[in-house]
Image: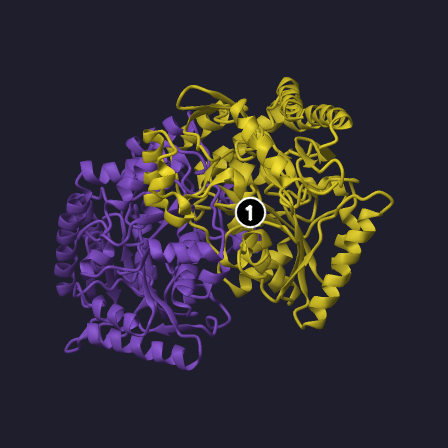
Chain colours: A purple, B yellow
Amino acid sequence: MLDGDTPTKEILDLNRFDDRAARTFEPELADRIRRRRATFGASSVLFYEQPIEMVRARGAFMYDASGKRYLDVYNNVPSVGHCHPKVVEAIAAQAAVLNIHTRYLNRAVETYAEALLATFPAPLTNLVMTCTGSESNDLAMRIAQIGTGKRGFIVTETAYHGNTALVTEISPSSLRKRAPADFVRCVPAPLLRPGEDVAATFAAAVRSAAADLEAAGHGVAALIVDSIFSSDGIHADPAGFLKEAVEAVHVAGGLFIADEVQPGFGRTGGGMWGFQRHGLTPDIVTMGKPMGNGFPMGGVVTRPDLLAAFCEETGYFNTFGGNPVAAAAGKAVLDVIAEEGLIEHARSVGAAFLAGLRDLSAHEPAIGAVRGAGLFIGLDFVDPASGAPDPALSTHVINAMKERGILIGAAGLYGNTLKIRPPLCFSAADAAFFTDTLAAILGARA
Amino acid sequence: MLDGDTPTKEILDLNRFDDRAARTFEPELADRIRRRRATFGASSVLFYEQPIEMVRARGAFMYDASGKRYLDVYNNVPSVGHCHPKVVEAIAAQAAVLNIHTRYLNRAVETYAEALLATFPAPLTNLVMTCTGSESNDLAMRIAQIGTGKRGFIVTETAYHGNTALVTEISPSSLRKRAPADFVRCVPAPLLRPGEDVAATFAAAVRSAAADLEAAGHGVAALIVDSIFSSDGIHADPAGFLKEAVEAVHVAGGLFIADEVQPGFGRTGGGMWGFQRHGLTPDIVTMGKPMGNGFPMGGVVTRPDLLAAFCEETGYFNTFGGNPVAAAAGKAVLDVIAEEGLIEHARSVGAAFLAGLRDLSAHEPAIGAVRGAGLFIGLDFVDPASGAPDPALSTHVINAMKERGILIGAAGLYGNTLKIRPPLCFSAADAAFFTDTLAAILGARA
C-alpha cells in the first residue's frame, strides 16, 4: 500500500520493468515508462498495469493523450473541481504581482488567514501556514509533544498521515519492513459491527493504548486520526462516535489532533470540517491536499497557548508557507465552496450516491458494507459465501472501471474497500453513471 | 536567529506587541499588526521595527503600499527576478490545463525531470520531487541513514537546513533552549584565516566529529552543508576547500549531502550548483527555495542504489511533489537561467560587486572581511579597534538601508555579517547603488 490509497496490484511496479516486460507494451508507451523509471528511479509509481498519460482535466473529468475521458472518482486534491477557473485565475493574478514570504505585511495573506480561521470553533484562533499535509502533521506532533510534555501518539493501524521522518512513524501503511517507533501505539479502525457500540469499543482501545504508553514511560502527547478514517477504509458512523475516544485521551493528559487533510473543506457534507460531525473541538487541526485545489499548501490551526509553548522551544518559519499566491488560491477555494454551495452539494449528492450504492448492494452479494459521509464513501467487496474481504475483486473492478472511463482506487486493511472520493462538483448523474457501471461490471462477471 | 537569516533586532517581536507598544505606531499599521498577531500567534515574524506592507514586485525591486520602491538584496527565492513573466506564464498556463500528482504519465513532469537531471554529474540520475527544501533534507537524511546503516550527522554550528522535526535537529540556529539531538555533531564554520589551510582545518574538524559519532555508537550517515555556508556567514574560498572534508566523511563510511537550497540554480556563478566550485560529486543533493522562483517545490537528486535501498524500507509519495504546475515553473526557471545567461551574469556582476565592496572596505575600518562567490556575498562589520564582531552595526545598517530603499539582512554566528543575496537579475548599477548607499550610511555615522 502506498499513501494508504491503493493496493499494489493496480500499480505498475517499475522496479520490475525490464526489457522483457517492456515488450508487452506499445513501443512509445514502453519508452515513456522507461524514461520515467530512469529519472524517478525506485520511487516511481504509476497507476494501472497500462499507465495513462493525462493531458488535461476540468471539473470532475480528466482526459488522456488519446482524448479518452475519465470520470474522476478518486482525486480529492482538486476538490472544487479540476482546474476550477476561479482558482486558476486567482493563482495567475497573484503570481504576476507578488510572491513572497510572510515577513512583510500583505493583504492577501491576512485576508485568507482571517477567512479560514472564521470557519473554526472559538479556541482555535491561530494558524501556521505550511506547504503540505505532511509538514502540517510534523509540526502538529511537535506542538502536542511540547504542549503536554509527553512523547507518545495513538493512531489507527492502517493510518497514513504523511511522509516526513516523524510523520512516517505514525503512518503504519508506509512502513514496509518494521513496526512504528516505540512511542507509537496502533488501535484497530472503528468498525461498525452489529450489536456493538463503536464509540465505546474505539474509546476502550484508545484508553488501553494510552495506559500502555504511560506504562512505557512515554505518556500520551496525542491521538491523531482523520475523522473519516480514510486509509482504514472509511468509517463515518454513527456521527459522534469519536467523542468518547477524544475524552479518553484528554483524561490521559493527551491532546486530539484532527487530521483534516482527507475529510476537510466540506467533503463530508456536514460542515467545513470532518470533526464537526463528531460534535467535538480538537486541540490541533491539520490541513493539506484540498486546501489550494492543487496549489501546494497546508496549515495547522491550534490554540494560542499551544503555539506559544512550541515557539518558545523552537523557531519555526516556513519559507513558502503563507506566500500570497497560496493565500489567493486558498481564498478562492473558500469562496467557491461558499458560492457553489459545495458543502450542501456534497451532503445531498453524497446521500443519493450512498443510497444508490446500497440499493445495488441489496442485489449484489459481492458488495458488503457501504458507508460514508458526504462525498467520501467506502464500499467493501466480500466473498458472498464467507463474507471474507475480497481484494481481488477490488482490483478487477478498478481495472474494469478504467476501461469504462472511471478512475477509482481502494483502501482499508485488506484493500477490499473502494475509496469513493470524487471532486466535490461531482453530480448526481456522475454518481448514477458510477453505480450503473459498477452494476454492469459485477453483472458481466457473474 | 530565525531561518539562520536575521538577528532578532531587525524583527518586530510580536510577542511583545501589547497595547502600549501599539500606541507607537500609526493606528492603521497598529491594527494590521494586531490582526497578524491575532491570526499567526506566537509564530508571527515581521521584518523591521516598523513592518513594511508589500504590494507588488518585479525583477530586483519590491514596492510597498505607499508606492515606495525597494531594491531587494535579500530574497533568493524569486531567484530569476520577482514575478518573472516567463515563470508566471508557465504557472498560469499549466494550472489552467492539468494539476495532478505523478501517478499518471505527463509530459510536463517528464520533460522537467530530464532537463533538471541533465545539469548533474553522471552518477546522480534519480530525482524525487518534494514541495520544500525542508522535505528534501528530511528525505535525504533518511536516504543517508538507510544507505549507510549509520545514524549520525555532521553540520556546521550555525547551520539551518529546514523545519521538520528531523531537520530541526541538524539546524542548531533554530533550537532555542537545547542542543541538537545526540546523533548530531556541530563543527565550526570554515573561516578563512591568514596563514591557515581552511581545507585541512575544516576536514580535521569533520574527521574528529566522525570519530566522536563512531565512538558514541551512531556512526556517520552524512556530512550535510550548503557549500556557500549561508547561515554561518558565507564562506566560499578558496574554491575546492570542501573536497578534503568530503573525502574524510567518505573514509568514515558516511555520505555527503549537498544542500543546494541556498547556493543552487546558478547563484554562485561557477555553474548551476554550488558543489561544482569545490570539484566534488555529492552522494545526495537537495534543492528548494529558488527551484520554482517562488512556486513551492523542492527536490532530492541521488544515485539509484541509494534511492532503491530507501524505497525498500519505506514507501515515499509526495502528493504535490512533481505536479505539472511545479514542473512547468521549474522548467521555466531553467530556461530563463539559460536564455538570460544568469550563471555568467551572477559571476560577472558578483565579481564587480565584490570588488566594489572590497574597495569600500579599504577605506572603512568598520568593514572587516568581504567574501563570496557570484551573487552571494558576506560582509563583516567589526569594531575597528579590536576587530571584534559588531552586530549592532549590522542592525543599524539594515534599518538605515530600509529607509533608503534597500532590503538586506544579516547572518553568521554573531549576526555581524551582511548577507548579500539578491535576485540573479541584479545589475551592476544595482550593485553600485548598494555600495554607494552603504558608504553613505557608514560615512554619516562617523
Q: Please say if A249 is above or below A431.
A: below
Residue A198 drawn at (x, y percent): 20, 73
Q: Position of residue A327 (x, y in %)?
A: 36, 37
Question: Given the image, on which type of amino acid does mark 1 rest?
Answer: Met
Which residue is identified by label 1?
Answer: B1
Residue at 65% across / 38% down in the picture? B417
Quadrant for residue B310, please give it. bottom right
- To which quarter of the image does residue A398 belong? bottom left
Classify residue A432 as left or right of residue B386: left
Residue A440 percent location from the top left of the image: 21, 54
Viewer-proximal residue, B199 or B404? Answer: B404
* Residue positioned most to the right: B195
Q: Could you say which is closer to the camera, residue B227 or residue B120?
A: B227
Q: Residue furthest top?
A: B429
Residue B120 in the image, given as x and y percentages of width and height: 66, 42
Whether residue B395 sits left or right of residue A3 in the image: it is right
* Residue name at image x 17 percent, y 53 percent: A270
Residue depicted at x 13% and y 64% = A363
User: Can residue B317 be seen?
Assistant: yes
Q: Which class describes the residues within 10 Å of circle 1: few (<14), some (14-19), or many (20+)?
A: many
